[in-house]
């Protein structure tokens, strides 16, 4: 049958990235640093560059290739190798792949020790070709207590649910940090982590611990950036925090990119 996509293009413009997006497909997500893996569902985006001389790419090949690796644990390093394979398969010079999924940790309460699974959001991203790199993004919720409120109020201080995000960029050959290590890095930057299970003695502990470590949204991103900068082997990073304010009509955010 005629291959329309492979026919000559009638354009002077090459395409930077073309492919499929918003594809939901299972993944056995693996932490490259620890070997831990878990089965979950990812939202995928898979693309390649396209030369001006070619009319289109073969979209179905993305699905076929993804299905072939779906039963095998996949970490960030594996996604980069897959990106290289996709570029070869589609006769492209570069490829851009990402998979976003839920990652679960068993987290124990600070006093009672009661534990349950706590979810976070993780994204693997890999780019092959001249701009080859791999990136790991993690998102986690934490608790922040307002330093200003603590300073001016005679009783208590207001708290926020903080949404924290960190992206680390790495060269393809660099060692990938642990997912759980990065999640802990963000949580330490806030007034307190959040927990899936809290008994009364745990609530007392968390409330008092947060009161002893008040932070502005600016403090959170600076503390996270200080820790991220000491990881080594990073090509760069971005850290962002959003405080969902409890007494204001607005939310607050801060972001640091390095370098």
Image (cartoon, helix red, strand yellow):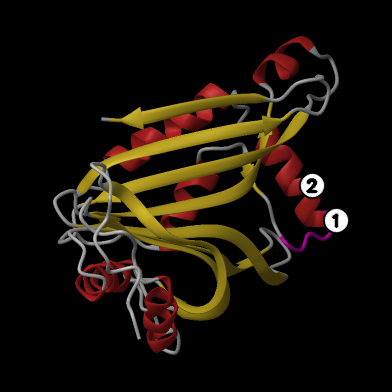
The percent coordinates of residue 2 (x first, y second) are 33, 80
Q: Quadrant of the C terminus?
A: top left
Contact flag, marks 1 and 2 (Cβ < 8 Å): yes
**Closer to the camera, 157 or 226?**
226
Above or below, 149 against 64 in this view is: above
In space, the residues marked 1 and 2 are separated at their CA atoms by 6 Å
Which residues are the magenta region? Answer: 196-200
Residue 212 visible to an observer of this rendering: no
Above or below 187: residue 53 = below
- Front position in the image: 60 or 2: 2
Q: Quadrant of residue 179?
A: bottom left
Q: Main secondary structure of the magenta part?
A: loop
Q: Check residue 200 in the rendering and tell me which mark sits there, or answer none.
A: 1
Is 8 colored magenta in this rendering?
no
Q: Which residue is mark 2?
A: 204
Q: Residues within 10 Å of mark 2 (few under 14, many from 20)?
A: few
Q: Which residue is painted at 28% across and 69% down in the image? A: 6
Image location (x, y in percent) of residue 81: 24, 72
Element type at marker 2? helix
Q: Position of residue 204 (x, y in %)?
A: 79, 47
> In the rendered view, does 160 fall on the left or right side of 44?
right
Is 257 displayed left or right of 164 in the figure?
A: left
Relative vertical location of residue 129 with respect to residue 192 in this rendering, above or below: below
């Amino acid at each position: 049958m005629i291959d329309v996509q492979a026919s000559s293009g009638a354009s002077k413009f090459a395409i930077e990235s073309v492919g499929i997006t918003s594809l939901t497909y299972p993944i056995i997500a693996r932490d490259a640093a620890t070997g831990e893996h878990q089965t979950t569902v990812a939202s995928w985006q898979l693309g390649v560059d396209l030369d001006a001389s070619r009319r289109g790419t073969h979209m179905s090949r993305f699905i076929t290739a993804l299905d072939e690796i779906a039963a095998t644990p996949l970490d960030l390093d594996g996604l980069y190798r897959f990106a290289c394979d996709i570029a070869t398969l589609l006769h492209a010079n570069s490829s851009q792949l990402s998979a976003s999924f839920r990652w679960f940790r068993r987290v124990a309460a600070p006093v009672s020790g009661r534990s349950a699974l706590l979810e976070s959001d993780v994204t693997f991203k890999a780019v092959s070709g001249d701009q080859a790199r791999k990136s790991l993004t993690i998102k986690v919720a934490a608790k922040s207590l307002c330093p200003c409120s603590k300073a001016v109020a005679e009783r208590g201080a207001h708290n926020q649910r903080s949404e924290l995000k960190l992206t680390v960029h790495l060269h393809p050959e660099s060692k990938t940090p642990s997912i759980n290590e990065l999640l802990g890095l963000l949580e330490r930057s806030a007034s307190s982590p959040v927990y899936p299970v809290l008994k009364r003695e745990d609530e007392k502990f968390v409330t008092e611990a947060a009161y002893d470590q008040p932070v502005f949204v600016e403090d959170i991103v600076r503390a996270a950036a200080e820790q991220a900068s000491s990881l080594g082997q990073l090509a760069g990073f971005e850290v962002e925090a959003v405080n969902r304010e409890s007494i204001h009509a607005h939310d607050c955010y801060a972001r640091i990119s390095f370098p």
